[in-house]
């Protein structure tokens, strides 16, 4: 048997058996399909967020619009959340226990001083997603937090903040495990 018919026979055999093994056959000359991966889901419970519930849901939606590697979802009834969100009378803060896990305190003190509730929510969720404070900073930096002033209502992460979360959750940066600190209370 010559090499050409042998190669064609081998390619046909491979194409027939690869799907059985869970793989996907790709015709010669066609590029390989992109790797399909699902975003890591981080669940949150905003039942204790009181008057901040809609701001929390909007902050989560902003992160979902901004990054692909992680998705924030309300926790299903009866399930344990990765993140608890509660309202209190103090300053907003996040207690990060590990990347994607912890407690967010939606503090009324900052709201009483004129800070935007959606920016607060998005900022504190940023800590849960591994981002540290970056103070002082401009309004264009979500993680500049309160240092941007009460007139700043920008709830969106900038490109560097998005890239950092993508790297932390997507595994594209070797050795990254989150930068907000584990078990560290972050007070803004």
Image: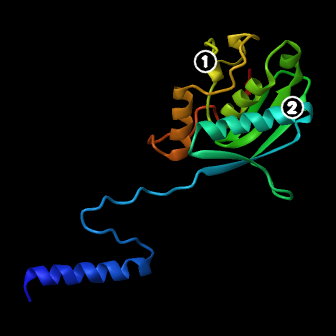
Direction left: furthest residue = 2
Q: Is residue 96 visible?
A: no
Quadrant showing the N terminus: bottom left
- When the figure is inspected, residue 137 is found, relative to residue 155, above or below; the finding is above
Give me the disc on residue 52.
Answer: 2
In the displayed structure image, the side of residue 126 where residue 105 appears, left or right: right
Quadrant showing the C terminus: top right
Q: Using the image as rendered, state which of residue 33 and residue 41 is in the foreground.
A: 33
- In percent of width and height, residue 56 lies at 79, 35
- When the figure is inspected, residue 33 is found, relative to residue 136, above or below; the finding is below
Q: Earlier in the sequence, mark 2 or mark 1?
A: 2
- Asked if the residue under mark 1 is in contact with the one under mark 2, i.e. CB atoms within 8 Å, the reply is no
For the point 45% across and 43% down, the residue is: 172
Dot 2 lies on which element? Answer: helix
Q: Which residue is mark 1?
A: 140
Q: Residues within 10 Å of mark 2 (few under 14, many from 20)?
A: many
In the displayed structure image, the side of residue 55 where residue 99 appears, left or right: left
Give me the disc on residue 35.
Answer: none
Q: Using the image as rendered, state which of residue 183 and residue 166 is in the foreground.
A: 166
In the displayed structure image, the side of residue 65 where residue 44 appears, left or right: right
For the point 76% across and 35% down, the residue is: 58
- In percent of width and height, residue 33 lies at 39, 59
Dot 1 lies on which element? Answer: loop
Quarter-wise, where is residue 103 in the image? top right
- In percent of width and height, residue 60 lies at 72, 38
Q: Using the image as rendered, state which of residue 186 and residue 68 is in the foreground.
A: 68
- In percent of width and height, residue 155 lies at 69, 25
Quarter-wise, where is residue 50 in the image? top right
Q: Using the image as rendered, state which of residue 81 and residue 96 is in the foreground.
A: 81
Q: Is residue 93 visible?
A: yes
For the point 75% across and 31% down, the residue is: 94
């Amino acid at each position: 048997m010559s090499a050409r018919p042998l190669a064609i026979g081998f390619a046909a055999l491979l194409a027939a058996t690869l799907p059985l093994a869970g793989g996907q056959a790709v015709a010669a000359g066609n590029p390989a399909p992109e790797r399909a991966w699902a975003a890591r889901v981080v669940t949150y419970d905003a039942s204790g967020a009181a008057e901040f519930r809609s701001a929390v849901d909007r902050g989560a939606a902003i992160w979902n619009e901004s990054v692909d590697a992680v998705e924030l979802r309300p926790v299903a009834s009866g399930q344990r959340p990765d993140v608890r969100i509660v309202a209190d009378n103090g300053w907003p803060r996040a207690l990060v226990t590990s990347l994607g896990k912890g407690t967010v305190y939606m503090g009324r003190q900052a709201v009483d001083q004129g800070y935007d509730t959606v920016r607060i929510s998005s900022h504190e969720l940023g800590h849960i997603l591994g981002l540290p404070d970056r103070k002082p900073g401009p309004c264009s930096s979500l993680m500049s937090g309160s240092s941007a002033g009460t007139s700043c209502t920008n709830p969106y992460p900038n490109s560097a903040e998005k890239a950092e979360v993508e790297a932390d959750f997507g595994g594209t940066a070797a050795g990254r495990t989150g930068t907000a600190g584990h078990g560290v209370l972050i007070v803004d």
